[in-house]
Image (cartoon, rainbow, N blue to C red):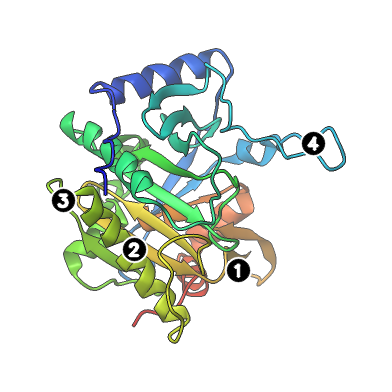
């Protein structure tokens, strides 16, 4: 078998992303939604909760012009304003058009591939190459992937999302216990056993692993997750995924959690429904996002409500 072509990532990737984001924001090509932030500690978990009131006004994707036309795909032919860089041979980097975290960018397949398929070796390798480019500059990158109807996925074109960890910390210096927050999956890997109310599988990875070894580490996490949901099923390592799940990766950790629900209703102290907390792959970073004042108030007043949501989004820990 021929050796895969390693992805080419510019050495100055963090500066490239920062410049592209700032330019696109000034020109109106990217919308940045400022947030308020608080630290919640349901059980022994440290989570950051962010509130973005203007996100409720986010425009919806345009509908197809023809009755049976294809939905708009922002990743297929991105504009020069949204393109950060090509990532030969198989991917490209684009900005997230609606950003809650500054410099949020996305790795997409150049060829249209399904979001619901098992990730391929070049998907993992291109993502890890971006993580390493940040690591070389003394910075951290959190990558996550949403797959399936319960995962928080929205776009069907395959993509993984990338968040600079320092920008995920924005505002934490001004809130009580802000310094206690760090990326959740790395805390889980260090602790050895997840103090979470849902099942998460983790693996340690190294920069000297081969692309095959890194991909196999992901496939093993996926296999274990599928076996937890369907104990008697033979697990395929390619094609349509058999479960909804979130996957996350940092420079030293992979994590994968099977999902059974996207979120749960949020209630106030009177027991009235005030909204719904939906969680995507950023749950593996230890972050959650709300769009209304009522949700923001209810979760801060009763942090254990977040614990109730976390208990319902996946499988119980083993």
- Position of 69 compared to 147: left or right? right
Question: Residue 280, can we see it?
Answer: no
Q: Is residue 188 visible?
A: yes
Which numbered tag is attached to residue 64? Answer: 4
Q: Which residue is mark 3?
A: 209
> For residue 269, which numbered disc appears in the image?
1
Q: Earlier in the sequence, mark 3 or mark 2?
A: 3
Side (left or right) of 29 relative to 45: right
- Please report whichever mark, 4 or 1, sits nearer to the chain's N-terminal start: 4
Residue 315 percent location from the top left of the image: 45, 77
- For this orientation, the residue located farthest to the front is 1
In this rendering, is residue 258 above or below 152? below
| Circle 4: element type | loop
Mark 1 closeness class: few <14, some 14–19, many ≥20 residues within 10 Å: few
**In the rendered image, which residue does mark 2 sit on?**
219
Q: What residue do we see at 43% from left, 18% from top?
A: 20
Q: Residues under labels 4 and 2: Cα distance? A: 36 Å
- Please tell me which of labels 4 and 2 falls first in the chain: 4
Residue 259 coordinates in the image, percent (x, y): 50, 68
Residue 5 vs residue 108, the one in the foreground = 5
Question: Residue at coordinates 24% horizontally, 43% vertically from top-left?
Answer: 3
Q: Earlier in the sequence, mark 1 or mark 3?
A: 3
Where 238 falls versus 94 (above or below)? below
């Amino acid at each position: 078998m021929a050796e895969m072509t390693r992805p080419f990532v510019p050495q100055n990737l963090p500066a490239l992303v920062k410049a592209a984001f700032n330019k696109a924001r000034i020109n109106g090509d990217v919308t940045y939604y400022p947030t308020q932030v608080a630290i919640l500690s349901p059980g022994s978990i440290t989570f950051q909760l962010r509130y973005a009131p203007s996100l409720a006004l986010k425009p919806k994707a345009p509908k197809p012009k023809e009755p049976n036309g294809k939905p708009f795909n922002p990743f297929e032919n991105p504009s020069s304003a949204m393109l950060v860089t090509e990532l030969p041979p198989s991917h490209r980097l684009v900005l997230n058009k609606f950003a809650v975290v500054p410099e949020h960018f996305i790795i997409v397949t150049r060829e249209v591939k399904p979001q619901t398929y098992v990730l391929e070796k070049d998907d993992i390798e291109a993502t890890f190459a971006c993580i390493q480019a940040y690591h070389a500059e003394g910075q951290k990158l959190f990558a996550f992937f949403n797959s399936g109807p319960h995962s928080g996925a929205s776009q069907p074109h395959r993509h993984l999302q990338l968040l600079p960890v320092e920008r995920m910390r924005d505002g934490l210096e001004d809130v009580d216990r802000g310094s206690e927050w760090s990326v959740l999956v790395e805390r889980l890997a260090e602790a050895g056993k997840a103090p979470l109310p849902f099942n998460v599988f983790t693996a340690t990875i190294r920069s000297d692993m081969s692309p095959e070894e890194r991909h196999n580490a992901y496939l093993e996490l996926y296999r274990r997750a599928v076996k937890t949901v369907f104990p008697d099923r033979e697990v395929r390592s390619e094609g349509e995924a058999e479960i909804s799940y979130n996957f996350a990766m940092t420079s030293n950790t992979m994590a994968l959690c099977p999902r059974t629900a996207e979120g749960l209703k949020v209630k106030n102290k009177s027991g009235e429904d005030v909204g719904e907390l939906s969680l995507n792959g950023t749950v593996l970073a230890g972050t959650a996002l709300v769009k209304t004042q009522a949700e923001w108030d209810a979760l801060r007043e009763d942090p254990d409500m977040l614990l109730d949501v976390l208990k319902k989004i996946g499988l119980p820990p083993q």
